[in-house]
Amino acid sequence: MASTPFELKDKTVFVAGHRGMVGSALMRRLAREEAELLTVSRSEVDLCDQAAVNAWFAARRPRAVFLAAAKVGGIVANNTLRAEFLHDNLAISTNIIQAAHANGCEKLMFFGSSCIYPRLAPQPLREDSMLTGPLEPTNEPYAIAKIAGIKMAEAYRSQYGSDFISVMPTNLYGPGDNYHPEYSHVVAALIRRFHEAKLSGAASVVVWGTGTPRREFLYVDDLADACIHLMKTYSSPELVNIGTGEDIAITEFARAVAAAVGYRGEIHFDASRPDGTPRKLLDVSRLAKLGWRASTSLEDGIRLAYQAYLRETKQAAE
């Protein structure tokens, strides 16, 4: 634990990946912190380009960094774009962590992902289960890149005394999600599918997989709030899981999304599609001891996510 709180007020804070779902949630939450927020678009600086990242950090010298930039996607994207997921995520992590260290960054938060825990690790997933068994094959390249980022933050803390910390979010959903029909995560995919089925009057909707896997879902603005809390109060090499500590079968979850969208047709499950890990629930006892718990219920979160989907698709069409 940090002996003194880390203040964000009046500091320059860089959110890497500010246009993504996590990054935009961090921007919304950081607006309350009286910090000077720094962002950079992909057209200005490619985070995979080491020289460009180094030059930007040398010019702007942020005091705090949230490393939320990553190449992300669902099962199909992870399994199809394996080289891109490995290369891009390794490059982003390496470039930003090194540039932060070289330019006097006071604190950095690296974002892992709960899908990097071993495929069959005991549930709920504890932070110390990382690297204790084989990974889920469908997202192994992404997982290896993220593990490298976590270990890099840990190594810089060990060798240089850098105040770099890592967090492990569970499955996220909410404003700014990716609704691609093939490459999206399960929440965004279901919201889009049920919405389009409602508009077309489809009698049934097919959901990928058997419906038996259990997943934990966290509303992205809750994640952002947890991250600000940890950035201010936590300083240790150990990971911190961020989740709700509760999970739900995909079958039940699909019904909850259908209800929120107002779709009343039948739901069928396509067992020929991959299920991924059988269960993925985080042990959030460390986070609870650090003084934070999620506040958005799944029902409220899905409703808010659907409202965001309607808003974002309308804006995209205009």
Image: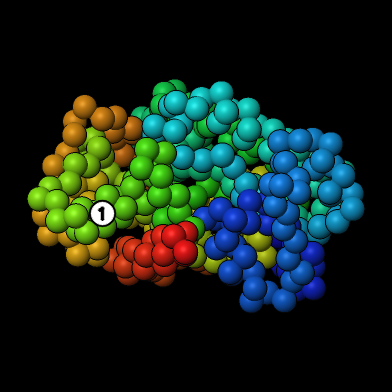
**Display colour scheme:** rainbow
- The residue identified by callout 1 is 196
The percent position of residue 313, horizontal first and vertical second, equals: 41, 60
* Front residue of 101 and 195: 195
Decide which of 207, 137 is in the foreground and name it.
207
Q: Residue at x 84, y 36 (%)?
A: 51
Work out whether residue 49 can be spotted: yes
Q: Residues within 10 Å of mark 1 (few under 14, many from 20)?
A: some
Residue drawn at x 72%, y 58% is 39
Q: Where does residue 125 sit, x and y in percent of width and height?
A: 41, 42
Residue 58, compared with residue 82, is above or below; it is below
Q: Is residue 99 left or right of residue 81?
A: right
Give the residue type at disc 1: Glu
Left or right: residue 290 versus residue 270 is right
Q: Locate residue 214: give its quadrant.
A: top left
Q: How many marks?
A: 1
Asked whether, in this view, residue 139 is left or right of residue 190, the answer is right
User: Is residue 9 positioned above or below 164 on the image?
Assistant: below
- The spot of residue 22 in percent (x, y) is 54, 55
The quadrant in which residue 302 appears is: bottom left
Regarding mark 1 in the picture, which secondary structure is present there? helix
- Residue at 10% across / 50% down in the picture? 203
- The reply to whether residue 226 is visible in this rendering is no
Instruction: Pick the quarter of the image with the N terminus.
Output: bottom right
The structure residue drawn at horizontal position 22% and vertical position 59%, both measured from the top left corner, is: 199
Looking at the image, which is closer to me, 245 or 249? 249
Above or below — where is 106 with respect to 295? above
In this view, which residue lies farthest toward the front?
318
